[in-house]
Amino acid sequence: MERKPKIRVGIVGAAGRMGRIIAQGLHRATDMDLVLAVDREHADESLRDVIGPHMPDVPIRSKLGEALDETPVQVIVDFTHPSAACQHALSALKRHVAPIIGTSGLTSDDLKEIRRQAEESGTPAMVVPNFAIGAVLMMKFAETAAKYMPDVEIIEMHHDGKADAPSGTALRTAELITQNRRAWPTENVAPIIKLAGARGANLQGVQIHSIRLKGMLAHQQVVFGGDGEILTIRHDSLDRSSFVEGVTASVRAILGRTGLTVGLEAILDN
Ligand code: NAD
């Protein structure tokens, strides 16, 4: 039987907390070839110097566009910063390279622009707010519960280095809830707010509370209230390894798709 060629893949944000873990996952995948690494830190060092001797001797480049022009890849995976991720996606699409964006904090305008460019260039793109399978199931369960229990609040908890709030996962969960609830939530305005922000942020009737603390990684509770009952759906990512399988599954799936795919749930049953 003929062996399928390996997927040539690049990691952007390679020296970051996520990038280092994901780079190792991509290198371990026997059907992938990790041939490109980009990060504005550690430029010109190699993945081997920065991550460890088990990694390939791939140089870290500081600019994605230049790196893509010199090293052909089919897919890039981006874990950088909300200020850079959209540009990275567009830069890849322009070169017919499929971007998978794990960076959170993209705006709806960013998504529109990525979708447009993906369709125009005939190159697929993915934006995935959470690559952990348990987190995707949490969102699915919340989507189901919202049909029957419209009163709900979200508490998301992350490490103190997270750049954006609320998290992409919390926003996506709230979006799914608002698309699926059959009734508007009970009006619950605290008449006396003694400290601004005490009730959190509000996305179309869903309150979202963001905790940022040392010791946390990525956690979320979706709390539904009914008459005399509470339903709590909780997910905890205890280690960044929880995101690796979702990333490798996305790399395998993306080349068979068209346009923009949002969320890991779209490829789960493939
Ligand atoms: P980090 O700060 O540890 O790492 C980001 C890396 O990107 C850094 O090494 C930085 O130098 C690099 N970088 C930033 N801007 C760049 C640019 N313009 N060009 C090249 N390199 C650049 O952050 P992190 O904890 O690894 O998180 C990265 C992103 O991933 C965040 O948005 C976070 O919320 C998101 N995240 C997503 C998931 C998911 O499942 N989708 C899971 C965890 C984290």
Image (tube, rainbow, N blue to C red):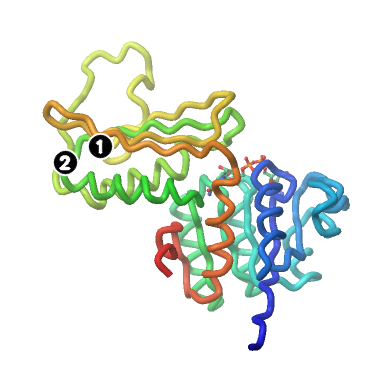
Q: Position of residue 222 (x, y in %)?
A: 33, 36
Q: Does the beta carbon of the residue at mark 2 sit less than 8 Å from ligand 1?
A: no
Give the quadrant of the C terminus. bottom left
**In contact (CB < 8 Å): disc 2 and disc 1:** yes
The answer to whether residue 33 is above or below residue 193 is below
Residue at image mark 1: 205
For mark 2, give the secondary structure: loop
> Please, what secondary structure does the residue beneath circle 1 have?
loop
Q: Position of residue 212 (x, y in %)?
A: 52, 26
Kind of residue at badge 1: Gly
Residue 166, by quadrant, is top left
The three-letter code of the residue at mark 2 reads Trp
Q: Which quadrant of the frame does ligand 1 lie within?
A: top right
Answer with the quarter of the image where residue 30 lies.
bottom right
Q: Is residue 171 left or right of residue 92?
A: left
Q: Quadrant of the N terminus?
A: bottom right
Which of the numbered marks, if any, corresponds to residue 184? Answer: 2
